[in-house]
Amino acid sequence: MKIRYIQAIFFFILLGAPLRAQTLDEARGWYLEGRYAEALPVFQQEYQEKPDNAPLNQWVGVCLYETGRILEAKGYLEFASSKKIPEGYLYLGKLLVKLYRFEEAEAEFEKYQKFHRRNNEALDRLEQEREYADKLQRAVNRTEDVQLIDSVVVPKSDFLSAYNLSQAAGSLMPLGQFFKEPVNAGETLHMNERQNKVFFARGDRLGGSTSLFTMEKLLDTFGNEKALPQTINTTGHQAYPFVMSDGLTLYFASTDHQSFGGYDLYVTRYNLATDSYLVPNQLNMPFNSPFNDYMMAIDEQKGIGWFASDRFQPEGQVCIYTFIPNERVTLIEGEEEGYMARRAAITSIRDSWKEGTDYTALRASAQEKVIVEQDVTGEFNFVINDLVTYHSLSDFKDRQAQSIYSQARGLSNQLWELNNELAEQREKYAAGGSDSGSLRIEILRMEREASTLYKEIKRLEIQARNQEIRNIFN
């Protein structure tokens, strides 16, 4: 009986051996076909028994790289490169480029070039990677000097929960919440403050691309759906729109427009003179990266912006960064390459901080769920510090601070009315007519006035806050 039992076990082992070999062969086939997610678990299982096998390290590393698990791939590809696996040279170089370690990447590319010096196909492939590396390095050297307030990692399925916009910035929502019908997961819609205009993405019937559309409210329902012009809706995917409170400035994400990889962030502006949008501009690093960067939103009332990125995040997770929007683009200059790379990659948000900025208060404002500009009782939310928020003028202890903030509230009411009038004038201009020329001049004048009012309001709010803190809390 014991002999039969041993024979049975031996029989099943013999059956299992060719099955496993066949499975590994299948994984190699999937690998060559680019089916990396299917091949990966088979290679990983084999790697457990043969961690020093150079080809297995290459296969696992490449599969991890191609499925977006960049940091996990690094050790495997380094081992494959050390064992002189040519594909290991190339992929380790590609990985180092995405980490902005360009000199180390070029060293790997040189090894690959030396091995394939007579293989024109391999050399052409290498040339493409070098061109991409050069493009990325130029972008790193143009990193914007933006102050990052905070970062939080959330499930991508619920990433909009991290965007706490004030009423003046409008509202963001999943596309399915607005249309009440099945749509592609992750697609979003932006509705303006007056709740009479929306911007959203919609895919074609074949699912090969998505384009941006807008609709306006007609009586009680939205209609008059229009696609945005081809300067925006090129090939690939355009999605995640956000329109500033001026009604003209549009942020969106695109996989085209010469993106660095995946979605990149772009900005364009409606041109009143031509009744169309300008050619979009790609945002600088750190807003963009070789990964997916999307859903830029800027709340002018809070003085805070948000954007999402899946750089170095696990599958299904996304990092939401909050930042202080710059009035004008300012690049980081005169710094060594390592520092520039860290700022571009957002290795540490503290690297971007400047003296004299209250990041605790800004973080509290960014996380505040609802900002009520002014209701019928005259109440408001005015953050003094991370522990104190005022809701009425009587909360002020310092009379001068109270007076200054009262001035800011008065200007806020003027700005509110001016923005409403601006929206009406823009609607008239969009409808056309014989007086479109004079309307355009008036709209431009009102925009300048709104900009001046906004800056004065922010100045008075800062002055009121500092006055209250200086004389009450010190």
Image (tube, rainbow, N blue to C red):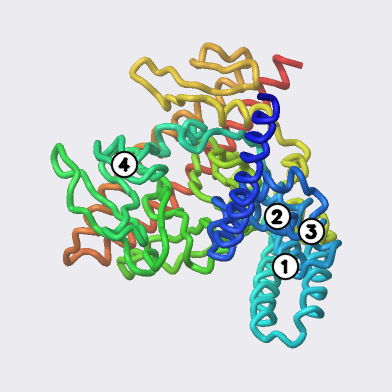
| Amino acid bearing label 1 | Glu
Residue placed at 75% from the left, 55% from the top? 57
Q: Is mark 2 on a helix, strand or loop?
A: helix
Q: Mark 4 points at which residue?
A: 420
Q: Which mark is residue 87?
A: 1
Amino acid type at circle 4 is Asn
Residue 61: assigned label: 2
Give how far apart the Cα atoms at labels 4 and 2 are: 56 Å
Question: Is tag 1's residue or tag 3's residue first in the polypeptide sequence?
Answer: 3
Query: Which quadrant, please, contains the C terminus?
Result: top right
Q: Which of marks 3 and 2 is in front?
A: 3
Secondary element at image label 3: helix
Q: Position of residue 121 (x, y in %)?
A: 64, 82
Mark closer to the chain start, 4 or 2: 2
Identified by mark 2, the residue type is: Gly
Quote the CA–CA distance across marks 4 and 3.
66 Å
Whether residue 164 is visible here, answered yes or no, is: yes
Residue 399 shown left or right of residue 114 in the figure: left
Residue type, numbered disc 3: Ala
Say which residue label 3 marks: 54
Q: Distance between the residues labelled 2 and 1?
A: 10 Å
- Mark toward the viewer: 4 or 2: 2
Eye-nearest disc, 4 or 3? 3
* Circles 4 and 1 in contact, beta carbons < 8 Å: no
Which residue is most to the left? 219
